[in-house]
Each structure stands twice: as C-alpha cells, then as structure tokens.
Image (cartoon, rainbow, N blue to C red):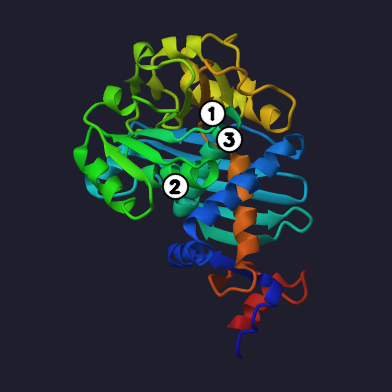
Amino acid sequence: MTAPLPSEKAFIPFVSVENMMRLVHHVGIETMLVELTDAIEADFRRWDLFDKTPRVASHSHDGVIELMPTSDGAVYSFKYVNGHPKNMAQGLQTVTAFGLLAEVSTGYPVLLTEMTLLTALRTAATSAMAARHLAPANSRCLTLIGNGAQAEFQALAMKAVLGIQEVRLYDIDPKATEKTVRNLGKTGLRLVPCTSAQAAIEGADIITTCTADKQFATILTDNMVGAGVHINAIGGDCPGKTELHRDILLRADTFVEYPPQTRVEGEIQQMNPDYPITELWQVVAGRAQGRSSERQITLFDSVGFAIEDFSALRYVREKLKGTDYFQKLDIIADPDDPRDLFGMLLRAG
C-alpha cells in the first residue's frame, strides 16, 4: 500500500544556506541590514513581553555549544550556535548556527533555517541599533579591530544605518584585513588598512572589537581610548573571553542586553557585581538615557541575546512570502487521525 502523503500543515519551510544567500541578494544586503535593525529595535521596545533566560551552554576546552530560546507568548524561537576559535586552523567556521520558529498555540514549527549567515546579519544589525542610540551624532568613521567573518557585515550595517563613510581596519593577521578590503572594495566606503590597533582608532567615532580568540585579551588599553567615542565590544561572548582592559570600563558608561548573561560572558565579567550598567532596551524604549554628552565614552558590551535571533527569524519568515527561497520539509508526523500514529506507520508498510 502506498504511504499517505503528509498533510500540508506538516510541511515546514526550510531555508538552506543557498536559499538564504538568494534571499539576501533578492532583498539587498544593505536594505536587509536596515530592515533587520528596525525589526530588532521594535522587539527591544516590547522587551517586557519576552521570556528571558541566559543561553544554555555546554563548554569544553575546544569551545562552546549553546541553545538560545525565547518567546513573546505567541511565537517561540531557539537557536543552536557554537563558538570554536580553533576551527579556523582546520578550515572550518568559528561560529555556525541554525534556528527554529514555532507557534506557541500548537507547538508546531513554522520555520527552520540556517543561521550562520543570519547570525552575522543580526549581530551587525544589533551593533548598528546600539550605535544609533549611543554613538556620537553624525558619526562618519568606524574602526574594526578583528577583520574575520563578521567584519564586512559590521561595516555595511554602520554604513547603511548610520551613514559611516570611512572604515579603518586592523587584524593581527594581515590576510584578514586584505580579505576585508577586497570584499568591501565596491561598497563606496573609504577603507584604511592599519598596521596596529593604535593607528586604527585614530579619528574614529565608533570602535568595534570583534576578535575570535577564546581568552582574556587586551585589544584596547585605557590610554588608547579618547573621550567621546562609542565602543561596540562584540567579541567577548563566553566566560574567560574579553577584549578590553578593565580601566576602560571604569571610564565608560556601559550598556548591555541581558545582565544575567552579560555578567558571565561579557566584558563586565572583569568587574565587581555592583559595577553600574544600563540595559539597552531601556534606552530604546525611552526609559533610560543613552549618550548624554559629547565627551562621554559609551560601551555596548554585546554578547548576543535570543530576542535578537527571534527578531531575525520572524523577519525571514515574512520575507519568504511570495518567494521560492525555501524547501518544504516533512519533519512532523501528522496523521489524519491524531490518535492513530501507529496506524499511519502500519499503512506506510
């Protein structure tokens, strides 16, 4: 007997890496970064509605594997993501990810997608959102310290959202900087490769640190950071990994996503528990002040949070409508009679 076909509601849209790339080019990279920035900001404004928990992490000496769940009461999402800095030496990605979106009312998944590319896009969009609220007005110069897989996304998000015109680049590996210059060569940005972090931050309005090594590092020291800059510290994302000297934090006003997670994984893991911080969503929602003076140093201590993934997943689901940038996966056993799962198996034989 021929096995019965699954009902249409049992098919789940799946976005492969190939289709994600098609979708990005269909929308336009800079347009997508702007729209993702706005989508994340809209969800930050309704922060109170979300379930919030630090990501569930499994640490090893090689890296970390994490699950990042959240829900707004109507839709549930989670992301699987790893961080393995040593992978690069084997020709593998440092970070890979996939994510799922589901309806709370039924528990049925409604989207499964790659999130290696999507995480890079949403991380850059989150950085741009933070800078939109915290960076000096009319910022035009961005420094990127760490020119790996995230660099181009960060540069284009700052260009599209804030109007950045110049990007100063530094990496301990000159080939990484060469790669970034090559990839951004036709974007209209003025690109300035530098031979030291000190040279790279000269004249910068915004400094973004996005290095990969899993260790306590000092990418920036206190004497390097002048008054009035905004720092996006996005490379520190697990216990035992930081990028900034703690004296910078003593001078800066620090903004975070979710304090219980950031105190374990972010730059502020170096600080005492009573170190003052402001949650970024409060600034976005108008409940707290962001930049208050021209000479203020603002720091976005970003480790990535599940609500940002939720926003990105919902955005992708909306953008898929009317396209063929997905496959239908049969991953839900859904017999015509919900009580007869075994009967469906028998008939398939």
Three-letter residue code for mark 1: Ala
Q: In the picture provided, is 311 more to the left or to the right than 136?
A: right
Query: Contact (CB < 8 A) between labels 1 and 3?
Result: yes
State the SS at label 1: loop
Question: Residue 86's quadrant in the figure?
Answer: top left
The spot of residue 293 in percent (x, y) is: 59, 17
Q: Residue furthest front?
A: 138
| Residue at image mark 3 | 132
In the rendered structure, find residue 156 and report the number of the disc placed on it.
Answer: 2
Separation of marks 3 and 2 at Cα, in angstroms: 14 Å
Q: Earlier in the sequence, mark 1 or mark 2?
A: 1
| Residue at image mark 1 | 135
The residue at the point 38 percent across, 12 percent down is 222
Q: Earlier in the sequence, mark 3 or mark 2?
A: 3
- Is residue 114 shown above or below 79? below
The spot of residue 34 in percent (x, y) is: 57, 50
Image quarter (top left, top right, bottom left or bottom right) of the N terminus: bottom right
Q: Residues within 10 Å of mark 1 (few under 14, many from 20)?
A: many
Three-letter residue code for mark 2: Leu
The spot of residue 124 in percent (x, y) is: 49, 43
State the SS at label 2: helix
Q: Residue furthest bottom?
A: 1
Q: Residues within 10 Å of mark 3 (few under 14, many from 20)?
A: some
Viewer-closest of 2 and 159: 159
Separation of marks 1 and 2 at Cα, in angstroms: 16 Å
Three-letter residue code for mark 3: Arg
Q: Is residue 210 visible?
A: no
State the SS at label 3: helix
The spot of residue 307 in percent (x, y) is: 63, 41
Image quarter (top left, top right, bottom left or bottom right) of the C terminus: bottom right
Q: Residues within 10 Å of mark 2 (few under 14, many from 20)?
A: many
